[in-house]
Amino acid sequence: MYWEKDLETLPREELYELQKQRLQKTIQNAMRTPFYRRLFTREGINPEKIKTPEDLRYIPFTTKEDLRQGFPFDFLAVPLEEIVRLHSSSGTTGTPTVIYHTKDDLDRWTNQVARCLYMVGVRKNDIFQNMMSYGLFTGGLGMHYGAERIGALTIPIGAGNSKRQIWFLKHFKSTVIHIIPSYALLLSTIIRGEGLDPRRDFNLRIILLGAEPHSEETRRRIEDIYGAKAYNSYGLSEMNGPGGAFECLYQNGMHIWEDYYIVEIVNPDTLEPCPPGEPGEIVLTTIFRDATPILRYRTRDVAALIDEPCPCGRTHRRITRIQGRTDDMFIFRGVNIFPMQVEKVLMNIPEVGTNYRIVLERKEYEDTMRVEVEIKPEFFFGDLQKLERLRERIADELRAEILVTPEVVLVEPGSLPTQEGKAQRVFDFRRL
Ligand code: ADP
Ligand code: ZN
């Protein structure tokens, strides 16, 4: 049931002591990096005074921009010859952010991932098909080594190439997959197109969903399509990658390993701490990493802290599902909207297919929002009047959730653009 029982169920007071120790070590370590040395000097912070998680509040936040500007070595705390690997976030524009790892860092990260996998029931006899991209992206290698450590047969198939994915699923009877949720939906339509049934023709039991925000409704849909349990896996390259926070068998929020990180949730406007239950931006401090210590990293991901104990017995606290990123929230006619709110509504409507997108435009000084929704073939090619009623229903349900009425356009299945990587949901043409 546990990979490391003592650590996973460590009483909270002891966990706190461990955090204190590791934080102090991390601060010493951070003082070896040019970035934090400069920051502490500039802010007049005495590193010896930072002893407890509460003391972190004296330190300014670190942002993605800081990491970018610190390229290549401003965050490095160990000599270069100690580094055995680097990872870098997707960074579609500008300088990517680079995270360095020592051998020990990688070993600990692998252990962290093994803990997560074991928690949801992955075992030695499993066949693990890792459908995340290998390379700089952490989802591939990060999860790979964790699965190997458990002893599962780990297939490094990587992302995309759906026909090959299906061939492996069918012939190796993979029992566990690691996949981006939007791709899990897309892949299911390709599977059916090949005349196969994802429940009957495969042997899946566990699906690990990570790398992009997705709603509870999407998870249930994926579970239903594949006839397997799906667990939410959250991570970001700045904080290692997969293994950051992970659901247990109860599927009631994601445990953050607090012997690896100190977690804070802050209001993104005031930067004040949010009480448990109130969503805000996740801020993380690494306390178990040597090469690249990062203090109070603003992840830009929005979630709430869950303070209640979990029935699984693990004492590490949980966060809710990620509601979105502060930078993917858009403002339409003055209302703040997360794409996830739209997704939640759509994925709850049985006639809706597997893809959608939100298009924002400016017409004659007025902003418009159009939600294009793929409809399952049996409904799309059916009765036109029924289709119109469905369209109205979708618009009504969206209005109830986001408080504005978007234009809703129902489209043929398979007609919207797809991505094999993280899905782009919002197309904002207003600024052009
Ligand atoms: P980038 O920041 O360039 O996308 P990463 O590969 O490090 O690079 O992606 C990490 C981000 O992916 C997280 O900050 C988060 O926004 C998103 N993400 C990862 N896993 C999840 C998840 N399970 N739920 C929601 N969002 C996720
Ligand atoms: Zn739990």
Image (spheres, grey):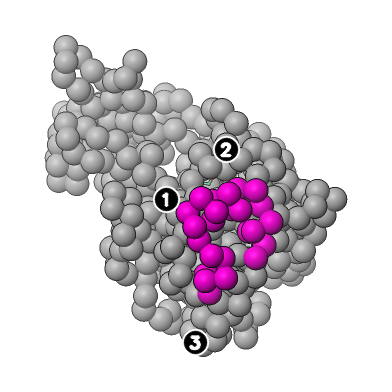
Q: Earlier in the sequence, mark 3 or mark 2?
A: 3
Above or below 24: residue 357 = above
* Disc 1, SS: strand
7 or 143: which is nearer to us? 7
Quarter of the image for residue 396 reads top left
Query: Crowdedness of circle 1 by 10 Å Cα count: few (<14), some, many (20+)?
Result: many
The percent coordinates of residue 282 (x first, y second) are 42, 57
Q: Disc 2 marks which amino acid?
A: Arg
- What residue is disc 3 on? 13
The Cα atoms of the two marked residues, 2 and 1, are separated by 18 Å
Task: Say which of marks 3 and 2 sits in front.
Answer: 2
The part of the chain drawn in magenta is 28-51
Task: Say which of marks 2 and 1 sits in front.
Answer: 2
- What residue is disc 1 on? 301
Quarter occupied by the C terminus: top left
Quarter occupied by the N terminus: bottom right
Q: Is residue 4 visible?
A: yes
- What residue is disc 2 on? 68
Q: Disc 3 marks which amino acid?
A: Glu
Q: Name the residue: 59% across, 53% down.
A: 36
Above or below 166: residue 41 = below
Query: Crowdedness of circle 2 by 10 Å Cα count: few (<14), some, many (20+)?
Result: some
Q: Name the residue: 80% across, 48% down.
A: 80
Assess mark 1: CB under 8 A from ligand 1? Answer: yes
The Cα atoms of the two marked residues, 3 and 2, are separated by 36 Å
* Disc 2, SS: helix
The percent coordinates of residue 297 (x first, y second) are 50, 53
The percent coordinates of residue 333 (x first, y second) are 16, 31
